[in-house]
Image: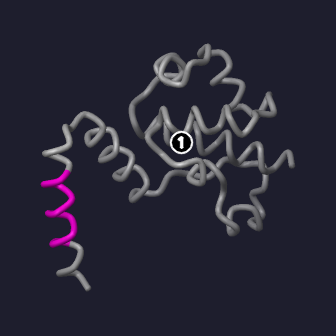
Amino acid sequence: MDALIKLIGGNIKKIRKAQGLTQEKLGKKAGYDYRYIGFLEQSRVNPTVRTLEKVAAALNFSLRDLFPKNSEMESGKKGAPPKATEREIIMAHIMKDLNKADEKTLGSINRIIKITVSKKK
């Protein structure tokens, strides 16, 4: 269980940093003190599912995204937080930018993405 908590904390930190958020800003968005966010990232607390839902929502990610993949759990680096891949960093930046868009703009962007991705197949 400790390894899982460390990986979740590492994922929270990785996503937060990729979005350019401080612990204080994430704390305000999620409704928690910045020190508690630090405790989450350092695996010093055992968060409830509700807490993780609030943090995930504040990061514009799903709760599932905070949990490690099976390969991370089985790796030899059980206590080390995973490093963000280039793809994850780009996705976090895109999510941050999309969060500022209105519904009409989001619809246009969605159509562009569908066209672009379907051409790659």
Quadrant containing the C terminus in the rendered view:
bottom left
Q: Is residue 115 left or right of residue 83?
A: left
Residue at the farthest bottom position: 121
Q: x, y (%) of residue 79?
A: 78, 49
Front residue (pair 57, 11)? 57
Label 1 Cα neighbours within 10 Å, binned few <14 / some 14-19 / many ≥20 = many
Of 44 and 106, which appears nearest the observer? Answer: 106
Q: Which residues are magenta?
A: 107-116
| Residue 114 or residue 93, whichever sits in front | 114
Vertical comparison of 24 with 94: above or below: above
Q: Residue furthest right?
A: 1
Q: Is residue 39 found left or right of 102 in the rendered image?
A: right
Q: Is residue 102 left or right of residue 92?
A: left
**Magenta stretch mostly in which secondary structure?**
helix
x, y percent for residue 15 = 49, 42
Amino acid at the residue labelled 1: Lys
Q: Which residue is mark 1?
A: 14
Q: Residue furthest front?
A: 103
**Residue 69 in the image: above or below residue 36:** below
Q: Is residue 42 above or below residue 7?
A: above
Image spot of residue 120 (x, y percent): 22, 81
Q: In the image, what residue occupies the spot 40% across and 56% down?
A: 86
Position of residue 86 relative to residue 39, above or below, is below
> Residue 33 placed where, x, y %?
61, 13
Residue, x 30% and y 47% (percent of image)?
A: 94
Report the number of numbered marks. Answer: 1
Left or right, 50 with reference to 102: right
Q: Is residue 34 magenta?
A: no
Examine the image and state in which quarter residue 18 appears: top left
* Label 1 element class: helix
Q: Quadrant of residue 9?
A: top right
